[in-house]
């Protein structure tokens, strides 16, 4: 059996030969880009199902602070705390509010968190063999391909939802109108944003809660 078709892997997920991944209690399928040939999960992390419409809340998924582990803060209904965490691997179920960043770590923090969100990294939130995409990987299958707004984001092979964003005050905004996805590169919190009028790669505060779509590799 190849490494791609592992029967049992770490982080409580299973990759079956029929292309189904069970991870953290949810079942995902795989989709392949017609542009790059890259393999992605069929929905955002934490989504109950793949999208049947762009504003289908069951496919919105979780909202992660940039570079942070899946310790429970990513839940849309998680509790909040205004005290920043002491390290990038410090565990807390609270969504950290009131700051531009969720940790007090500054020196080398960007590089640490970029590595932490890679496959096998210390804060790896994706199934084994998958990772949060780099900015280049994310752009290649979105703004560098056919995605120019929220309508084309949903009609693409990724079926991207307008899942909104969670700000530093913990409020969730723009559900049903704007979608966001983190990239793991760039210390400025690189992410994809798409709405009715456009789609672009931008920077965001690392304390913002934004969705994640995992890519193989």
Image (cartoon, rainbow, N blue to C red):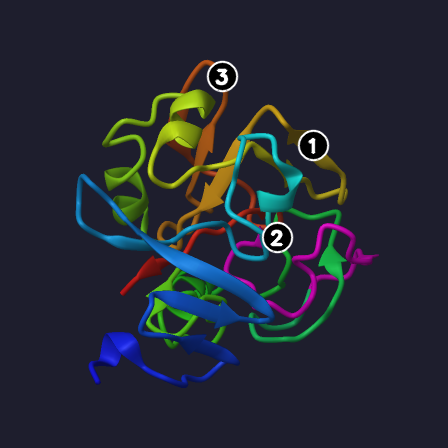
Main secondary structure type of the part rendered in magenta: loop
Mark 1 closeness class: few <14, some 14–19, many ≥20 residues within 10 Å: few
Mark 2 closeness class: few <14, some 14–19, many ≥20 residues within 10 Å: many
Instruction: Point out the residue furthest to the top here.
Output: 197
- Assess whether residue 79 is covered by the magenta stretch: yes
Element under label 2? loop
Mark 2 against mark 1, which lies toward the viewer? 2
Q: Identify the residue at image location x=20%, y=81%.
A: 2
Which circle's residue, 2 or 1, is located before the other in the chain? 2
Q: How many numbered marks appear?
A: 3
Task: Give the label on residue 145, or none.
Answer: none
- Which residue position is annotated with label 1? 173
Mark 3 closeness class: few <14, some 14–19, many ≥20 residues within 10 Å: some
Mark 3 against mark 1, which lies toward the viewer? 3
Distance CA(mark 2)–CA(mark 1): 14 Å
Q: Quadrant of the N terminus?
A: bottom left
The answer to whether residue 50 is left or right of residue 132 is: right
Whether the residues at callouts 2 and 1 have beta carbons within 8 Å, the answer is no
Q: Identify the residue at image location x=44%, y=30%.
A: 154
The answer to whether residue 201 is left or right of residue 193 is: left
- Which residue position is annotated with label 3? 196
> Is 183 in front, or is 215?
215
């Amino acid at each position: 059996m190849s490494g791609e078709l592992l029967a049992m892997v770490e982080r409580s997920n299973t990759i079956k030969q029929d292309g189904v991944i069970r991870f953290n209690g949810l079942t995902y399928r795989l989709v392949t880009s017609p542009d790059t040939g890259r393999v992605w999960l069929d929905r955002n992390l934490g989504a109950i199902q793949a999208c049947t419409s762009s504003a289908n809340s069951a496919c919105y998924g979780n909202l992660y602070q940039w570079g942070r582990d899946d310790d429970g803060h990513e839940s849309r209904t998680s509790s909040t705390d205004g005290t920043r965490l002491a390290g990038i691997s410090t565990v807390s179920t609270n969504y950290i509010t009131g700051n531009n960043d969720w940790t007090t770590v500054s020196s080398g923090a960007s590089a640490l968190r970029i590595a932490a969100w890679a496959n096998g990294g210390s804060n790896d939130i994706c199934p084994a063999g998958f990772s949060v995409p780099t900015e280049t990987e994310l752009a290649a299958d979105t703004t560098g391909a056919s995605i120019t707004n929220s309508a084309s984001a949903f009609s693409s092979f990724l079926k991207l939802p307008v899942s909104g964003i969670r700000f530093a005050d913990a409020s969730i905004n723009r559900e049903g109108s704007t979608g966001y996805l983190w990239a793991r590169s760039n210390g400025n919190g690189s992410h994809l944003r798409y709405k009715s009028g456009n789609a672009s790669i931008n920077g965001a505060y690392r304390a913002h809660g934004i969705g994640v779509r995992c890519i193989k590799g």
